Amino acid sequence: MILTQAQLDQLYAQMRADAPHETCGMLGGKAGRAQKIYPIKNIAENRVKNYLMDGAEQIRAMQDMDDNGYDILAIYHSHPVTQPYPSATDLRDAWDADLQEPRYPDTLYVIMSLRQPDAPEIRAYQLHDQTITEIELEYRD
């Protein structure tokens, strides 16, 4: 997936503003290039350790993506004090156990971390049941 430096800066700014809570949202775009960031309110009961996207905001973001011809490229969230690697909860939430398939097929999961505040980290993953595959992020303007 391709991000611009401005998009990366926007994601990091959102993460910092929401810390110590987890931040979340979606990335819309075409052909693997992010076109728009959709910050979505985290309504989880324990926002320090979890994220749950506000359903109404998520639907509005998905409608805007449809209106603009964007695909859902990624769902993003942060781990404010731990590494940017999928947790057991992240894996569980990405998988529909009833249907035995990913909730958002072909969608990446982007995880950011502030465990080193002066050097934020970002990684992208394809999650399939218990399989975690890291996907390279590219930065181009």
Image (cartoon, rainbow, N blue to C red):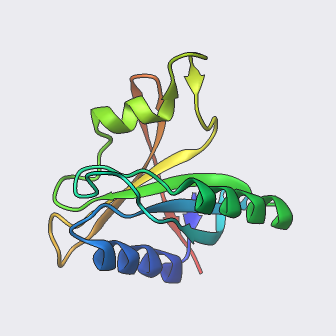
Q: Where's residue 10, x and y in %? A: 46, 80
Question: Of 94 and 6, which appears nearest the observer?
Answer: 94
In this image, 17 relative to 114: left or right? Answer: right
Q: Is residue 32 above or below residue 117?
A: above
Q: Residue at x 58, y 64 (%)?
A: 2
* Residue 90 location, quadrant: top left
Q: Where's residue 17, x and y in %? A: 32, 80
Q: Is residue 115 above or below residue 104?
A: below
* Residue 35 location, quadrant: bottom right
Q: Residue at x 82, y 67 (%)?
A: 68
Q: Where's residue 13, x and y in %? A: 37, 81
Q: Is residue 15 above or below residue 93?
A: below
Quadrant that contains the N terminus: bottom right
Q: Residue at x 39, y 76 (%)?
A: 14
In this image, 137 relative to 35: left or right? Answer: left
Q: Residue at x 23, y 51 (%)?
A: 49
Question: Of 24 and 47, which appears nearest the observer?
Answer: 47
Quadrant that contains the C terminus: bottom right
Count of marks overlaid on the render: 0
